[in-house]
Image (tube, grey):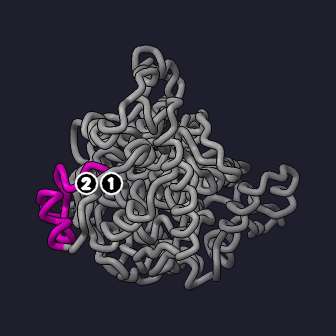
Amino acid sequence: MSTLHDAAPTPGTRVAGLDLPQHVILDGTPLTIDQVVAVARHGASVEIHESALARMARNRGVIDDLAHDAVPHYGVSTGFGALARRHIPTQMRAQLQLSLVRSHAAGSGPEVETEVVRALQLLRLATLVTGHTGARPVTARTYAAMLNAGITPVVHEYGSLGCSGDLAPLAHVALAAMGEGQVHDTEGGLVDAADALRDAGIAPLSLAEKEGLALINGTDGMLGMLCLAVHDLRRLLTTADVAASLSVEALLGSDAPFAEDLIGMRPHPGQAASASNLRRILAGSPLMASHRELDDAGNPACTRVQDAYSLRCAPQVHGAARDTLEHAATVAGRELASAIDNPVVTTDGRVESNGNFHGAPVAYVLDFLAIAAADLASMSERRTDRFLDVSRSEGLPAFLAHDPGVDSGHMIAQYTAAGIVSELKRLAAPASVDSIPSSAMQEDHVSMGWAGARKLRRSVDGLTRVLAIEILTATRALDLRTEAPAAGTGAVRDAVRAGVPGPGPDRYLAPEIEHVVQLVATGQITAAATSAVGQLD
């Protein structure tokens, strides 16, 4: 996973093969994961519905009334966090909001990716338009205009503890909306926020009572990264089934354990979906047929009773990851339906403090997904390793080398996969079980959800690479067999061969690995399989 800042997507552009919206209307109803991905990664434009602006204006009136109340109200006429007991005079309240954003824009370290910044800005905007934050319509319009203009505030790797929301990351976005700090333009260039806003015709925000708090108090960073990860892992889980199919076939494994009646004896939905994919991809394989042939005496010609777990148990492991992913998607959906701020304006006009900003629900599933990614990659690497060992590869040359001893074949490709898997195991250690108290013990338990999201992004990248190495290795092995592959696996092999030559003397291997990484990441591997066998789960 690169931490280098990438250029913002051009608003309204379309990516081939992706069924994602080009335009997202924000009306206060929950966003979908696909909408988040469309805006964050592919530059879909946003529009705020007039009904949402009207609702914001009505609820803003509640905040304006409290601003003139003699009784202190948190975030409106008081300080923040451990300083909440100080009543702030009217003439100091604009400075209060300005100081809040400036002081909380305290991130450090490398910049996070454009898609992450756009996701967290979109999700904060989605909460603003619910009206529950009490922010003014002009504030929402400014955020929407920045997204549509491709202005991406600089947000840093470190600064969020995942409680009271992703404070520092969101503060950097708010700071840019005020015309302070730095941003990236659509070309990725680093410019002053004031200049970028001026060039785009956007007036810098001057914050009113409570608005600084409304702009920084949400789980939007960790949720945005969860949405992106869920989207990517859905593709990778199907890719894992494709990779396992290639390996089962090229290692002369059996498809018998994937039979529907056997899988149905353990009715996990993810396991059933994975096994169904394996059956479809392997259907009609001449290599599979060898397990059903009889010798002259009428006995099974194949003497292998059981395949190794990394082949036979692929649906069970891949399926468990699928079920974990669906749980994470459910949590993401609930969070996308949430309006997170503190305090909030309720439907009946009360302004109440609450704890909904705590990131625990999101943090837990971010950690759970990192565990699933590590385990998927671990099983994939074990299948890759089987191809390289003459005692387990069923007649393939050592390391799939052209001339073993002179050539090393895929020996070190497996090292690369093993190194990644080792890191993914470390990344699977949960962040959410940690907590470091802050704000003079006012915030004495935090979720570390942002940290969980950051490591999950690296885990997703690592899983992509490990699966690519398995696919590269398995397709080479298929080419070394005399029988033709199944239609599904053959289509994938052909897709790889379009950019990577077949077996031969050793070549510079890194570019070939990277080529297949891109095929995996862009969905071209799964597209090749589905073109031959139909839609996969």
Residue receiving disc 2? 178
Image side of residue 386 versus residue 195, left or right: right
Q: What x and y, as percent, mark residue 217? A: 46, 42
Corner quadrant of residue 407: bottom left
Q: Amino acid at mark 2?
A: Met
Does residue 191 sit above or below 170 in this rendering?
Answer: below
Q: Residue at x 61, y 70 (%)?
A: 287
Q: Which residues are magenta?
A: 173-199
Q: Does 181 lie within the magenta span? A: yes
Q: Nearer the viewer, residue 154 or 176?
A: 176
Q: What x and y, as percent, mark residue 268? A: 79, 52
Q: Nearer the viewer, residue 175 or 31?
A: 175
Q: Secondary structure at mark 2?
A: loop
What whole-number distance in Å separates the C-alpha atoms at marks 2 and 1?
Answer: 54 Å
Residue receiving disc 1? 410
Q: Few, some or many C-alpha atoms within 10 Å of disc 1 (few <14, some 14-19, many ≥20)?
A: many
Q: What x and y, as percent, mark residue 334? A: 65, 52
